[in-house]
Image: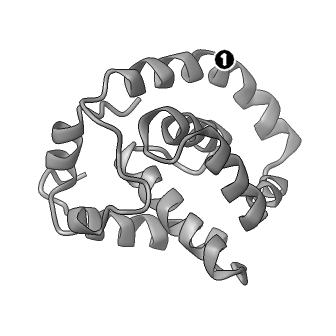
């Protein structure tokens, strides 16, 4: 990825590459806001949309953002985000479990090493900044 790509451009790229996940989002405004912040977390923390990427972004969101655990759980429930996991095959899930066992502790460790938590919902001021500069400012080292 281009070192000077802005968060906004990286989000547009993320959305384009993952269009299949966005087409059926007929949800409440609160759920839309949760997804907006969740998708931004995917980009900021460098997580893809595989099971491993989804599991990793959850860990980053809980330990490395201003959201916290209970708001995270409530946000997923409001957005019915758990239903998205039905899109993955059992083979993909089984194959991912071993990787998650290793990845989760690493993500927790890296989140704890951050300079400050990522502002979950109040990150609009960062949209036109280079993603690399954001990661540097927060000491985010993607897995």
Q: Is residue 140 left or right of 73 when viewed as pictured?
A: left
Q: Is residue 59 left or right of 45 when viewed as pictured?
A: right
- Is 1 situated above or below 114? below
Circle 1 sits on which residue? 101
Mark 1, Cα crowd under 10 Å, few <14 / some 14-19 / many 20+, is few
Please, which colouring scheme is shown? one colour
Quadrant assignment, res 97? top right
- List x then y, in percent, for residue 87: 80, 58
- List x then y, in percent, for residue 77: 78, 58
Q: Which residue sits at x=61%, y=44%?
A: 54
Element type at mark 1: helix
Rendered-image quadrant of the C terminus: top left
Q: Which residue sits at x=65%, y=24%?
A: 100
| Frontmost residue, 39 versus 112 | 112
- Is 62 situated above or below 84? above
- Is 52 situated above or below 50? above
| Frontmost residue, 115 versus 84 | 115
Q: Which residue sits at x=18%, y=60%?
A: 5
- List x then y, in percent, for residue 119: 36, 52
Q: Is residue 85 left or right of 18 when viewed as pictured?
A: right
Quadrant assignment, res 99? top right
- Is 14 situated above or below 44? below
Q: Is residue 117 left or right of 58 when viewed as pictured?
A: left
């Amino acid at each position: 990825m281009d070192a000077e790509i802005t968060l906004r451009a990286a989000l547009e790229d993320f959305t384009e590459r993952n269009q299949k996940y966005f087409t059926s989002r007929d949800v409440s405004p609160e759920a839309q806001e949760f997804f907006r912040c969740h998708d931004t977390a995917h980009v900021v923390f460098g997580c893809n949309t595989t099971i491993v990427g989804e599991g990793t972004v959850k860990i980053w969101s809980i330990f490395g953002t201003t959201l916290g655990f209970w708001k995270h759980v409530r946000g997923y429930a409001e957005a019915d985000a758990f239903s998205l996991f039905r899109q993955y095959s059992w083979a993909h899930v089984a194959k991912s479990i071993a990787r998650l066992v290793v990845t989760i502790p690493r993500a927790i460790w890296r989140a704890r090493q951050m300079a400050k938590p990522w502002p979950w919902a109040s990150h609009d001021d960062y949209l036109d900044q280079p993603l690399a500069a954001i990661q540097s400012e927060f000491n985010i080292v993607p897995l």
